[in-house]
Image (cartoon, grey):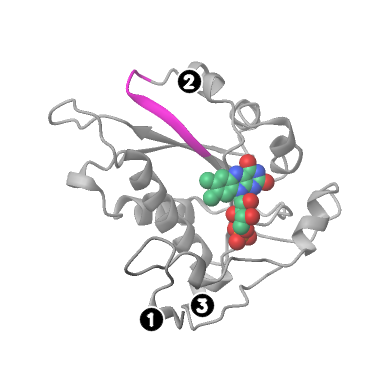
Amino acid sequence: MSKPANTDHDIHDVLSARWSPYGFSDRAVDKAVLSSLFEAARWAASSFNEQPWRFLVATRDEPEEFARMLSCLTDGNQEWAKHVPVLILTVASTKFERNDKPNGSAWHDVGLASASLAFEATARGLSLHWMGGIHRERIRSEYRLPEGFEPVTAIAIGYAEKIEAVPEPFRKRDRSPRTRRPIEEFVFSGAFGKPAAITGG
Ligand SMILES: Cc1cc2nc3c(=O)[nH]c(=O)nc-3n(C[C@H](O)[C@H](O)[C@H](O)COP(=O)(O)O)c2cc1C
């Protein structure tokens, strides 16, 4: 199943193809493909090359580990994510290793690495669904996160498919149109809120 963005301007196919499905097929993700996804994350840019991202991964072929990670998601997310083949938790290292000072870019850079992972996945025909609906305290204790490490998101990865196993309202959301605010509402020049001329505003 695909749901390409209906764009106002030309963008690369890998960007328009990425979307967040709820229905995933049972098809497992090859270990070599997973390694490529983390390799893509590895080469993301980061403030002072700190590489503050950490990933915890669980696949359905390890049912105990999978159930453990699933329990770190909110109930609503568990309902559909229990069908995905791969779950990931993203974690940020919040201090610079070189001087122990707070890294104000840590969450940004975890997002950047996750985006690299997402586009590598999309280019390989996989889909991802990020989740902010996670139990942060539970993640901290289940995985014994050291001091200075913060849970950021969970990510479901697999092959998007229209499947009956996914309950409503998720199936309906998979069928609903994708929407975005127009560029004029978030690209400004001269003053905050003043649409940039480049956007035609
Ligand atoms: C950081 C982040 C957190 C999200 N959290 C959730 C979540 O907890 N549950 C969920 O169903 N979708 C979640 N989403 C998915 C968004 O709802 C989705 O990306 C957005 O509606 C845009 O749709 P698209 O990704 O298909 O373009 C999250 C996305 C991001 C980037």
Amino acid type indicated by mark 3:
Asp
Amino acid type indicated by mark 2:
Arg
In this rendering, does residue 87 appear at all?
Answer: yes
> Real-space Cα distance between discs 1 and 3?
23 Å
Query: Badge 3 is on which residue?
Result: 13
> Observer-nearest residue: 3 or 200?
200
Whether label 2 touches label 1, CB < 8 Å = no
Does dot 1 land on a helix, a strand or a loop? helix
Q: Quadrant of the N terminus?
A: bottom right
- Please provide percent x and percent y for residue 9: 50, 82
Query: Badge 2 is on which residue?
Result: 140
> Observer-nearest residue: 62 or 159?
159
Foreground mark, 2 or 1, reads 1
Of label 3 and label 2, which has the lower sequence position? 3
Whether label 3 touches label 2, CB < 8 Å = no
Q: Which residues are magenta?
A: 146-153
Of label 2 and label 1, which has the lower sequence position? 2
Viewed as shown, does residue 50 lie left or right of 125? left
- Please provide percent x and percent y for residue 73: 63, 32
**Mark 1 CB in 8 Å range of ligand 1?**
no
Q: Is residue 62 magenta?
A: no
Label 2 environment density (alpha carbons within 10 Å; few <14, some 14–19, many ≥20): some
- Please provide percent x and percent y for residue 112: 37, 52
- The correct choice, above or below, for 77 with respect to 130 in the image is above
Label 3 environment density (alpha carbons within 10 Å; few <14, some 14–19, many ≥20): few
In this rendering, does residue 85 appear at all?
Answer: no
